[in-house]
Image (spheres, grey):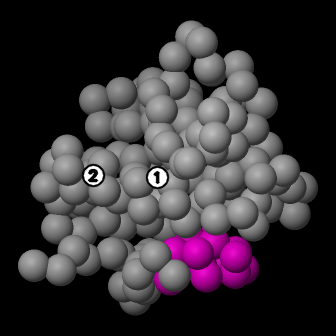
Amino acid sequence: MVELREITEDNYEAVLALRVSPAQEAFVPTVTQALAQAWVYRETAYPFAVYADGVPVGFIMLGYYTVRDQYTVWKFLIDENYQRRGYGREALRLAVNWLWETFRVQEVYLGCAHGNHAAERLYAACSFERTGLETETGFEMRLKFEQ
């Protein structure tokens, strides 16, 4: 069973130990970097540990981007030892549902780095679609809730 849990003094060290493969490091910041950002943006950042059957397997941080008035999946990773087991898809579903239940959002955004084909496939499988907004490093995707 996959679940999102608050990061506390009881689990932060295990969460900090989560790593992606060396080939993925260019696409994803470390959990340490993400938690530093969460602290700086503590009013609008919502970090969670991703657990599967009681074991921390990933990290996801949601946020509210005030400049564009939108909710986002800001940071997301599944540890290299737990990938390709469906945990990412379920964690993303739980995170999006948390945003909807907490803030009644109508859409959720995320960024995907150019060349991160595995992430793009995952996001597309979870009904995220490209918005057309692109930068030198990546592109934006959006999930719209059906009315």
Name the side, left or right, on which 130 lies relative to 116: left
Magenta highlight: main SS: helix
Residue positioned most to the top: 9
Q: Quarter of the image holding residue 105? A: bottom left
Q: What range is drawn magenta here?
A: 112-124
Say which element carries label 2: helix
- Picture residue at 41% right of the left edge, 54% below the top: 94
Residue 145 in percent (x, y) is at: 21, 74
Residue 113 in percent (x, y) is at: 62, 71
- Picture residue at 55% right of the left edge, 28% below the top: 36
Q: In the image, which disc is placed on residue 46?
A: none
Is residue 81 within the magenta segment? no
Name the side, left or right, on which 9 lies relative to 106: right
- Picture residue at 52% right of the left edge, 75% below the top: 123
Q: Quarter of the image holding residue 120? A: bottom right
Disc with the residue nearer the chain's start (2 vs 1): 1
Q: In the image, which disc is placed on residue 74?
A: 1
Q: Please determine whether, in this image, residue 18 is positioned above or below residue 112.
A: above
Q: Nearer the viewer, mark 2 or mark 1?
A: 2
Residue 93 in percent (x, y) is at: 42, 62
Q: Please determine whether, in this image, residue 111 is positioned above or below residue 130.
A: above
Residue bearing mark 2 = 99
The quarter of the image holding the C terminus is bottom left
Query: Is there any visible trace of residue 69 in the rendered image?
Result: no
Residue positioned most to the right: 22
Query: Is there any visible trace of residue 7 in the rendered image?
Result: yes
**Kind of residue at disc 1:** Trp
Residue positioned most to the left: 147
Classify mark 1: residues with Cα within 10 Å, few (<14), some (14-19) or many (20+): some
Residue 84 in percent (x, y) is at: 75, 67
